[in-house]
């Protein structure tokens, strides 16, 4: 099959070259975007008189016919035509005849593929934002049901202070809120049109790039044609944003793996999101959460891979840039799958409130409140910290927890202790005492829940 660009060549390309350089096996993902960009381009060509209005109409009709085949799965792509652009153009010529060859007037595959990628990233960015909001809603509902649920908060994976489970869940809500903010901000750089830049230097045809931007709902056009065809910053930025989302998904998944273990028993994951063992019949494995955690590596890899591809490229377009696609396609697929799973996992998990409460009664995580108690009675905090440390050591050596010590034992360490120390050390009072803004006290969590709901409602109107 003759190449659409083959006029200058005396030999056909080697079959190995065709197989190695062709991108149609994966860039057919851009079929709809390629047609969308072509429809706007040819409309502009007709309006500018570069092609006749009749020719423009015929080409548009042909593109719509191909789009129907793409949407129905009846479009057949060929490696001989290398990429999605040449495949669509060949289909168009087959559909409407030689006039289809006029579609490529005033553009290059270089600015065409860049435009396709901008259209793709704009669409997928909104999809990811919507999926993140589904996860946020799931977190919010679990948080509302667990404001008074007490569990140990950890630092260094050591029990630190009693907190509300709602407070813990809402920490992830705000991580995902920042993720959405980064994605939204990236649209400023995605929504710039490269089409009309040509191969690298613009075109001799009297085109109107602003009209194409208007038709495709872009905010602006690239002011430099060389930058337009060689810029993949927006893809790198998307990969970086997705990498951070995966960090947050991985951290939450790790906690669900820990919490559902026999050692913690803080939650139970629904059977629908777990698997069993081929040899140990008692096992209920959190495999989905583990895979959510594990797939982080492949997303990081795609980010580093594209950065490495781009770091040594001279201006303007180079074939290396073909390597931007598989990584971002796989990353988007990975994120869509992960976020689609995470929301129902959160919605269906069972929270073992009694087990969480038992955990905070069998540790020394209320020790900070002894130091605070003494500081409020006038003892310098650093001294109070030292006194409390000695008390904890005493309790450990005597195989007691702090609430199991009697008042006389407390007074051995300071005469400032009174009976009210026992009220101050109850887990629910330790939690309620954290009244500073953003703290774990139920009153503050209720404020946080309202703020989270407001944030989601504002997102819906964005």
Image (tube, grey):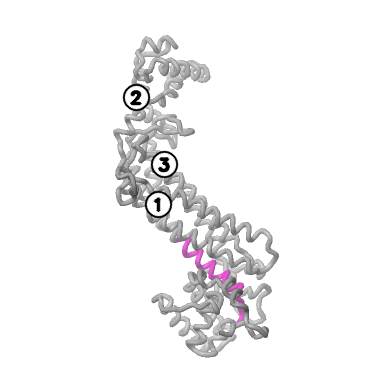
Where is mark 2, residue-wise?
A: 426
What span is in magenta?
Answer: 105-126
Q: Is residue 144 left or right of residue 124?
A: left
Secondary structure at numbered mark 2: loop
Q: Position of residue 233 (x, y in %)?
A: 60, 60
In the image, which is nearer the foreground, mark 1 or mark 2? 2
Q: Quadrant of the C terminus?
A: bottom left
Question: Is 176 placed above or below 124 here?
Answer: above
Disc 3 from disc 1: Cα separation? 24 Å
Question: Earlier along the polypeptide chain: callout 1 or callout 2?
Answer: 2
Where is mark 3, residue-wise?
A: 255
Q: Position of residue 430 (x, y in %)?
A: 38, 27
Which residue lies most toward the front here? 279
Which residue lies most toward the right here? 314
Q: Which mark is residue 324?
A: none
* Label 3: how many Cα within 10 Å (few below 14, some 14–19, many 20+): few
How many discs mark residues in the rendered view?
A: 3
In the image, which is nearer the foreground, mark 3 or mark 1? 3
Question: Earlier along the polypeptide chain: callout 3 or callout 1?
Answer: 3
Question: Earlier along the polypeptide chain: callout 2 or callout 3?
Answer: 3
**Which residue is at the front of the view, 42 or 321?**
321
Q: Picture quarter containing residue 429?
A: top left
Q: Residue at the spot x=36%, y=39% of the render?
A: 261
Q: Quadrant of the N terminus?
A: bottom right
**Which residue is at the front of the view, 226 or 52?**
226
């Amino acid at each position: 099959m003759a190449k659409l660009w083959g006029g200058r060549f005396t030999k056909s390309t080697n079959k190995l070259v065709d197989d190695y350089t062709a991108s149609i096996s994966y860039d057919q993902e851009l079929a709809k975007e390629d047609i969308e960009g072509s429809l706007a381009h040819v409309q502009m060509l007709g309006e500018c008189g570069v092609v006749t209005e009749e020719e423009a109409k015929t080409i548009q009709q042909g593109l719509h016919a191909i789009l129907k085949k793409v949407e129905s799965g009846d479009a057949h792509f060929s490696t001989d035509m290398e990429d999605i652009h040449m495949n669509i153009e060949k289909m168009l010529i087959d559909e409407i005849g030689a006039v289809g060859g006029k579609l490529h007037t005033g553009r290059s595959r270089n600015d065409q593929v860049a435009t396709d990628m901008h259209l793709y990233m704009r669409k997928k960015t909104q999809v990811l934002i919507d999926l993140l909001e589904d996860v946020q809603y799931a977190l919010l509902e679990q948080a509302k049901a667990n404001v008074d649920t007490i569990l140990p908060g950890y630092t260094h994976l050591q029990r630190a202070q009693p907190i509300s489970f709602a407070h813990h869940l809402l920490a992830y809500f705000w991580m995902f809120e920042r993720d959405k903010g980064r994605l939204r901000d990236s649209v400023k750089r995605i929504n710039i049109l490269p089409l009309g830049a040509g191969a690298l230097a613009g075109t001799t045809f009297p085109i109107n790039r602003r009209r194409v931007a208007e038709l495709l709902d872009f905010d602006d056009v690239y002011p430099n044609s060389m930058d337009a065809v060689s810029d993949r910053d927006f893809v790198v930025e998307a990969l970086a944003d997705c990498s951070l989302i995966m960090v947050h998904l991985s951290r939450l998944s790790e906690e669900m793996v820990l919490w559902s273990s026999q050692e913690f028993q803080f939650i139970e994951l629904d059977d629908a999101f777990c698997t069993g063992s081929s040899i140990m019949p008692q096992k209920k494995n959190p495999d989905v959460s583990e895979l959510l955690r594990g797939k982080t590596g492949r997303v990081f890899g795609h980010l580093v891979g594209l950065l490495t591809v781009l770091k040594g490229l001279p201006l303007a377009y180079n074939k290396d840039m073909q390597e931007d696609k598989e990584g971002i396609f796989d990353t988007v697929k990975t994120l869509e799958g992960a976020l689609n799973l995470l929301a129902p996992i959160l919605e269906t998990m069972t929270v073992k409130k009694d087990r969480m409460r038992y955990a905070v009664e069998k540790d020394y995580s209320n020790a900070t409140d002894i130091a605070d108690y003494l500081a409020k009675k006038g003892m310098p905090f650093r001294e109070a910290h030292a006194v409390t440390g000695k008390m904890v050591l005493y309790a450990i050596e005597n195989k007691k927890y702090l609430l199991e010590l009697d008042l006389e034992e407390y007074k051995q360490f300071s005469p400032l202790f009174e009976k009210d120390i026992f009220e101050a050390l109850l887990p629910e009072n330790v939690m309620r005492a954290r009244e500073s803004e953003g703290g774990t006290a139920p009153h503050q969590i209720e404020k946080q829940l309202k703020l989270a709901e407001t944030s989601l409602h504002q997102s819906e109107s964005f």
